[in-house]
Image (cartoon, rainbow, N blue to C red):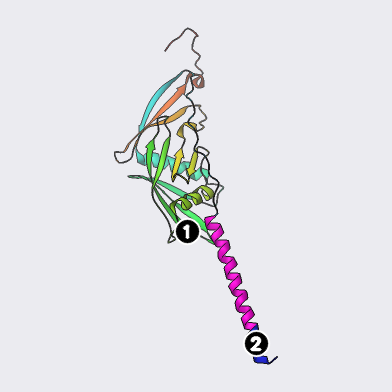
Protein backbone atom coordinates (compact mmCIF):
# COMPACT_ATOMS: atom_id res chain seq x y z
CA UNK A 1 0.00 0.00 0.00
CA UNK A 2 1.42 3.42 -0.95
CA UNK A 3 2.65 5.45 2.00
CA UNK A 4 0.37 8.42 1.22
CA UNK A 5 -2.70 6.21 1.14
CA UNK A 6 -1.70 4.48 4.41
CA UNK A 7 -1.25 7.86 6.14
CA UNK A 8 -4.61 9.03 4.80
CA UNK A 9 -6.35 5.94 6.22
CA UNK A 10 -4.69 6.49 9.61
CA UNK A 11 -5.95 10.07 9.81
CA UNK A 12 -9.39 8.90 8.73
CA UNK A 13 -9.53 6.34 11.56
CA UNK A 14 -8.38 8.96 14.08
CA UNK A 15 -11.08 11.35 12.85
CA UNK A 16 -13.87 8.79 13.34
CA UNK A 17 -12.43 7.80 16.75
CA UNK A 18 -12.52 11.44 17.91
CA UNK A 19 -16.10 11.85 16.64
CA UNK A 20 -17.14 8.76 18.57
CA UNK A 21 -15.43 9.94 21.76
CA UNK A 22 -17.09 13.37 21.50
CA UNK A 23 -20.48 11.73 21.01
CA UNK A 24 -20.01 9.62 24.15
CA UNK A 25 -18.98 12.68 26.19
CA UNK A 26 -22.03 14.59 24.93
CA UNK A 27 -24.38 11.72 25.88
CA UNK A 28 -22.81 11.50 29.35
CA UNK A 29 -23.28 15.23 29.99
CA UNK A 30 -26.86 15.11 28.71
CA UNK A 31 -27.59 12.21 31.06
CA UNK A 32 -26.26 14.20 34.04
CA UNK A 33 -28.44 17.17 33.16
CA UNK A 34 -31.69 15.44 32.37
CA UNK A 35 -31.65 12.30 34.50
CA UNK A 36 -34.75 12.62 36.72
CA UNK A 37 -34.37 13.09 40.48
CA UNK A 38 -36.78 10.96 42.60
CA UNK A 39 -39.70 13.08 43.77
CA UNK A 40 -40.45 13.53 47.46
CA UNK A 41 -44.03 13.90 48.61
CA UNK A 42 -44.89 17.12 50.41
CA UNK A 43 -45.35 16.27 54.11
CA UNK A 44 -48.89 16.12 55.44
CA UNK A 45 -49.62 18.56 58.29
CA UNK A 46 -49.60 16.81 61.65
CA UNK A 47 -52.57 16.94 64.00
CA UNK A 48 -52.38 19.47 66.79
CA UNK A 49 -51.13 18.27 70.15
CA UNK A 50 -53.96 18.18 72.67
CA UNK A 51 -51.70 18.62 75.72
CA UNK A 52 -52.36 21.74 77.82
CA UNK A 53 -50.29 24.75 76.94
CA UNK A 54 -50.30 28.52 76.56
CA UNK A 55 -49.94 30.32 73.26
CA UNK A 56 -47.94 33.50 72.68
CA UNK A 57 -47.60 35.64 69.56
CA UNK A 58 -44.12 37.00 68.77
CA UNK A 59 -43.66 39.75 66.19
CA UNK A 60 -40.37 40.43 64.44
CA UNK A 61 -38.91 42.15 61.37
CA UNK A 62 -37.57 40.59 58.20
CA UNK A 63 -34.10 41.97 59.07
CA UNK A 64 -34.05 40.09 62.38
CA UNK A 65 -35.51 36.95 60.83
CA UNK A 66 -33.00 37.11 57.97
CA UNK A 67 -30.10 37.09 60.44
CA UNK A 68 -31.60 34.15 62.31
CA UNK A 69 -32.27 32.13 59.14
CA UNK A 70 -28.74 32.58 57.80
CA UNK A 71 -27.17 31.78 61.17
CA UNK A 72 -29.13 28.52 61.08
CA UNK A 73 -28.01 27.85 57.47
CA UNK A 74 -24.36 28.51 58.35
CA UNK A 75 -24.60 25.96 61.15
CA UNK A 76 -26.29 23.45 58.85
CA UNK A 77 -23.59 23.80 56.16
CA UNK A 78 -20.54 23.51 58.42
CA UNK A 79 -19.69 20.05 57.06
CA UNK A 80 -20.85 20.74 53.49
CA UNK A 81 -18.96 21.90 50.40
CA UNK A 82 -22.10 23.61 49.08
CA UNK A 83 -23.24 27.00 50.33
CA UNK A 84 -26.21 29.29 49.90
CA UNK A 85 -27.81 32.33 51.52
CA UNK A 86 -31.37 33.51 51.98
CA UNK A 87 -32.42 37.16 51.75
CA UNK A 88 -35.83 38.43 52.88
CA UNK A 89 -36.85 41.54 50.99
CA UNK A 90 -40.04 41.99 48.96
CA UNK A 91 -39.87 38.24 48.48
CA UNK A 92 -37.66 35.35 49.59
CA UNK A 93 -34.43 35.13 47.59
CA UNK A 94 -32.12 32.11 47.66
CA UNK A 95 -28.63 32.62 46.22
CA UNK A 96 -25.96 29.94 45.99
CA UNK A 97 -23.89 27.77 43.66
CA UNK A 98 -24.62 24.48 41.93
CA UNK A 99 -22.05 22.02 40.54
CA UNK A 100 -22.35 21.71 36.76
CA UNK A 101 -19.83 19.60 34.84
CA UNK A 102 -16.40 20.23 36.42
CA UNK A 103 -17.19 23.67 37.85
CA UNK A 104 -19.96 25.49 39.69
CA UNK A 105 -22.43 28.10 38.48
CA UNK A 106 -24.39 30.72 40.44
CA UNK A 107 -28.07 30.06 41.10
CA UNK A 108 -30.67 32.65 42.07
CA UNK A 109 -34.26 31.84 43.02
CA UNK A 110 -37.05 34.27 43.93
CA UNK A 111 -39.88 32.74 45.97
CA UNK A 112 -43.23 34.03 47.18
CA UNK A 113 -44.37 32.85 50.66
CA UNK A 114 -47.88 31.55 51.38
CA UNK A 115 -48.87 30.78 54.97
CA UNK A 116 -50.85 27.55 55.37
CA UNK A 117 -53.74 27.01 57.77
CA UNK A 118 -51.62 24.78 59.99
CA UNK A 119 -48.86 27.42 60.34
CA UNK A 120 -46.42 26.05 57.77
CA UNK A 121 -45.22 28.06 54.74
CA UNK A 122 -45.09 27.21 51.04
CA UNK A 123 -42.52 29.14 49.00
CA UNK A 124 -43.75 29.32 45.40
CA UNK A 125 -41.06 29.89 42.79
CA UNK A 126 -41.41 33.26 40.99
CA UNK A 127 -38.21 33.33 38.92
CA UNK A 128 -35.06 31.24 38.70
CA UNK A 129 -31.74 31.29 36.87
CA UNK A 130 -28.49 29.32 36.76
CA UNK A 131 -25.64 31.36 35.33
CA UNK A 132 -25.89 31.55 31.54
CA UNK A 133 -27.42 28.08 31.19
CA UNK A 134 -30.89 27.75 29.70
CA UNK A 135 -32.52 24.99 31.73
CA UNK A 136 -36.15 24.25 32.62
CA UNK A 137 -37.23 25.63 36.01
CA UNK A 138 -38.17 22.13 37.16
CA UNK A 139 -34.68 20.85 36.33
CA UNK A 140 -33.05 23.66 38.33
CA UNK A 141 -35.33 22.86 41.28
CA UNK A 142 -34.18 19.24 41.02
CA UNK A 143 -30.58 20.44 41.26
CA UNK A 144 -31.47 22.48 44.37
CA UNK A 145 -33.00 19.40 45.94
CA UNK A 146 -30.04 17.19 45.04
CA UNK A 147 -27.10 19.43 45.94
CA UNK A 148 -28.15 22.03 48.54
CA UNK A 149 -28.48 20.59 52.06
CA UNK A 150 -31.79 21.51 53.68
CA UNK A 151 -33.19 20.92 57.19
CA UNK A 152 -35.35 17.81 57.56
CA UNK A 153 -38.44 19.99 57.84
CA UNK A 154 -37.81 21.71 54.49
CA UNK A 155 -38.87 19.87 51.32
CA UNK A 156 -37.97 20.97 47.79
CA UNK A 157 -40.79 19.95 45.43
CA UNK A 158 -39.53 20.22 41.81
CA UNK A 159 -42.81 18.95 40.31
CA UNK A 160 -44.76 21.91 41.74
CA UNK A 161 -41.77 24.30 41.63
CA UNK A 162 -42.07 25.13 45.31
CA UNK A 163 -40.42 24.62 48.70
CA UNK A 164 -42.51 23.42 51.64
CA UNK A 165 -41.26 24.79 54.98
CA UNK A 166 -42.81 22.68 57.74
CA UNK A 167 -42.21 25.18 60.55
CA UNK A 168 -44.49 23.15 62.82
CA UNK A 169 -42.10 20.18 62.53
CA UNK A 170 -39.06 22.07 63.84
CA UNK A 171 -37.43 20.27 66.75
CA UNK A 172 -36.77 22.73 69.57
CA UNK A 173 -35.00 21.66 72.77
CA UNK A 174 -37.53 23.41 74.99
CA UNK A 175 -40.41 21.45 73.34
CA UNK A 176 -42.01 24.73 72.33
CA UNK A 177 -44.08 24.47 69.15
CA UNK A 178 -43.84 27.20 66.51
CA UNK A 179 -46.22 28.12 63.69
CA UNK A 180 -46.43 31.10 61.35
CA UNK A 181 -49.30 33.55 61.82
CA UNK A 182 -48.38 36.32 59.34
CA UNK A 183 -45.60 36.48 56.74
CA UNK A 184 -46.12 39.74 54.85
CA UNK A 185 -42.68 40.79 53.61
CA UNK A 186 -43.80 43.94 51.79
CA UNK A 187 -45.43 45.30 54.96
CA UNK A 188 -42.63 43.89 57.13
CA UNK A 189 -45.34 42.19 59.18
CA UNK A 190 -43.97 38.89 60.48
CA UNK A 191 -45.48 37.10 63.44
CA UNK A 192 -45.21 33.62 64.89
CA UNK A 193 -47.28 31.66 67.35
CA UNK A 194 -45.31 29.92 70.09
CA UNK A 195 -47.13 27.17 71.94
CA UNK A 196 -45.58 26.47 75.35
CA UNK A 197 -46.59 23.15 76.95
CA UNK A 198 -46.93 23.46 80.70
CA UNK A 199 -44.98 20.25 81.22
CA UNK A 200 -41.90 21.78 79.54
CA UNK A 201 -41.87 24.37 82.35
CA UNK A 202 -42.34 21.77 85.04
CA UNK A 203 -45.92 22.89 85.71
CA UNK A 204 -48.41 20.18 86.62
CA UNK A 205 -52.07 21.12 86.51
CA UNK A 206 -54.56 19.54 88.86
CA UNK A 207 -56.93 17.12 87.18
CA UNK A 208 -59.92 19.32 88.06
CA UNK A 209 -58.40 22.48 86.55
CA UNK A 210 -60.04 23.81 83.42
CA UNK A 211 -58.78 26.53 81.12
In the displayed structure, would residue 191 be above or below residue 75? above
Position of residue 6 measured from the top left corner of the image (x, y, whole percent): 67, 87
Give the Cα separation between the discs numbered 2 and 1: 44 Å
Position of residue 79 measured from the top left corner of the image (x, y, whole percent): 57, 47
Q: Which quarter shows the N terminus?
A: bottom right
Outermost residue, bottom side: 2
Q: Nearer the viewer, mark 2 or mark 1?
A: 2
Q: Main secondary structure of the magenta part?
A: helix
In the displayed structure, would residue 13 be above or below residue 189? below
Is residue 18 shown in magenta?
A: yes
Which corner quadrant of the image does residue 12 belong to? bottom right
Q: Which mark is residue 7?
A: 2
Region rendered in magenta? 10-34
Which corner quadrant of the image does residue 160 belong to? top left
Residue drawn at x 48%, y 43% is: 157
Q: Which quarter shows the C terminus?
A: top left
Position of residue 171 measured from the top left corner of the image (x, y, whole percent): 52, 32
- Tally the numbered discs: 2
In the displayed structure, would residue 27 be above or below residue 200? below
Position of residue 205 measured from the top left corner of the image (x, y, whole percent): 49, 12
Q: Nearer the viewer, residue 122 or 208?
A: 122
Is residue 80 shown in magenta?
A: no
Outermost residue, front side: 1
In the shown orientation, is residue 157 left or right of residue 90? right
What residue is shown with label 1? Answer: 105
Q: Nearer the viewer, residue 26 or 79?
A: 26
Amino acid sequence: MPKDKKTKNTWKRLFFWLCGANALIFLFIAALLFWPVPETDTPEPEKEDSSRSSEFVVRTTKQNLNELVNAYIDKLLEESSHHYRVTLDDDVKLVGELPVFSSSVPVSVHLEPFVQENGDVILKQKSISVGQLQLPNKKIMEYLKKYLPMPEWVTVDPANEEIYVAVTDMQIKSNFRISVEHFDLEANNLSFKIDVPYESLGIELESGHTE
